[in-house]
Image (tube, rainbow, N blue to C red):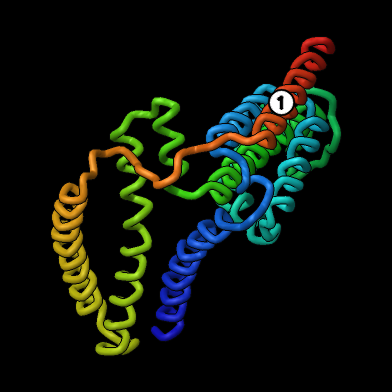
């Protein structure tokens, strides 16, 4: 029972720690780095161009160069590379890797045999075409996720929401995203405090029936608190003039660096587009 409890405790605390670490993104957005100094509108446009370029690129070497440029931008923006890589290589890239693995075998992607071995009378063949396709797919996912994460952690939350509205993203979507962002950390604190309270009052040993009763009662209590908090916060927001649009004190301002960055990105993307169609 103690071993099982330790596993549950490590799982809960690990999940809470992972979500809490996302708060560090606000600190990254406040750094005096290269990307933080850019106009959020220009930055969003250029990152969208990079992601579109990634989606249409079929050359792994080009993808590696774009990914290297992403890491360089992170370094110039004073982002810790360990923190950045941990955020970009977990979940989606690993999931895409599991999806891409079957494509390397000849049964799914016929082609020139690269590696062949027999297991229990069955011949397993890894093809060159399959390996290239799987590598291309995984690199596309990793590079796209890296640019998306880099945009989010170098742009303040409220500024990013305003940029979404400037791009005509539906208001209800932006408002829901903003509310979720604000409340996720509050609920994380509630879960952590509830778990510590149960541990201090009940201990680490309890019957399964008692455990289910405690979990059910806390779920009901959390729901009631969330519902009441939702009404109170909404009334407070209305009383302060909230209309669904994200508001910031300072308007966006473009500088010479913004226009030079936009011009450089356009030149790079145009060059890659020309080379791709020339070699097609």
Q: Which residue is mark 1?
A: 263
Say left or right for 86 vs 189: right
Q: How many marks can you see? A: 1
Q: Quadrant of the C terminus?
A: top right
Residue 150, image x, y percentages: 61, 46
Do we see residue 140 in this rendering? no
Q: Quadrant of the N terminus?
A: bottom left
Residue located at (53% from left, 62% from top): 24
Is residue 52 positioned above or below 221 on the image?
A: above
Residue 212, image x, y percentages: 22, 72
Residue located at (46% from left, 82% from top): 3
Do we see residue 1 in this rendering? yes
Q: Quadrant of residue 107?
A: top right
Say left or right for 57 vs 147: right
Q: Quadrant of residue 190?
A: bottom left
- Residue 249 vs residue 193, the one in the foreground: 249
Residue 58, image x, y percentages: 74, 24
Task: Using a 10 Å C-alpha cutoff, classify the residue at mark 1 as few (fewer than 14 neighbours), some (14 to 19) or many (20 or more).
Answer: few
Is residue 229 positioned above or below 47 on the image?
A: below
Residue located at (58% from left, 34% from top): 254
Q: At numbered mark 1, what does the secondary structure look like: helix, strand or loop? A: helix
- Residue 55 vs residue 8, the one in the foreground: 55
Say left or right for 86 vs 127: left
- Residue 68 vs residue 124, the one in the foreground: 68
Q: Quadrant of residue 27?
A: bottom right
Residue located at (43% from left, 67% from top): 16
């Amino acid at each position: 029972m103690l071993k099982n409890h330790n596993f549950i405790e490590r799982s809960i605390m690990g999940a809470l720690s992972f979500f809490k670490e996302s708060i560090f993104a606000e600190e990254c957005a406040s750094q005096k780095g290269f990307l933080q100094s850019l106009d959020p509108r220009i930055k969003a446009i250029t990152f969208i161009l990079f992601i579109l370029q990634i989606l249409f690129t079929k050359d792994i070497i080009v993808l590696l160069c774009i990914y290297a440029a992403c890491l360089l931008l992170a370094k110039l923006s004073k982002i810790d590379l360990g923190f950045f890589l941990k955020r970009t290589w977990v979940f989606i890239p690993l999931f895409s890797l599991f999806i891409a693995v079957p494509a390397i075998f000849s049964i799914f992607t016929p082609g020139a045999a690269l590696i062949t071995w027999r297991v229990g009378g069955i011949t397993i063949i890894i093809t060159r075409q399959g390996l290239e396709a799987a590598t291309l797919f995984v690199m596309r996912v990793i590079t796209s996720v890296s640019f998306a994460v880099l945009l989010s952690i170098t742009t303040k939350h409220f500024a990013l929401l305003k940029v979404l509205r400037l791009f005509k993203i539906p208001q209800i979507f932006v408002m829901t995203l903003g509310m979720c962002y604000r409340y996720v950390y509050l609920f994380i604190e509630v879960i952590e405090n509830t778990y510590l309270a149960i541990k201090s009052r009940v201990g680490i040993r309890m019957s399964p029936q008692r455990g289910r009763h405690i979990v059910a009662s806390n779920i009901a209590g959390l729901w009631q608190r969330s519902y009441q908090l939702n009404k109170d916060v909404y009334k407070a927001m209305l009383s302060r003039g909230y209309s669904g649009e994200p508001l910031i004190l300072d308007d966006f301002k473009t500088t010479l660096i913004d226009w030079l960055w936009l011009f450089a990105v356009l030149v790079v993307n145009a060059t890659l587009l020309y080379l791709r169609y020339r070699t097609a």
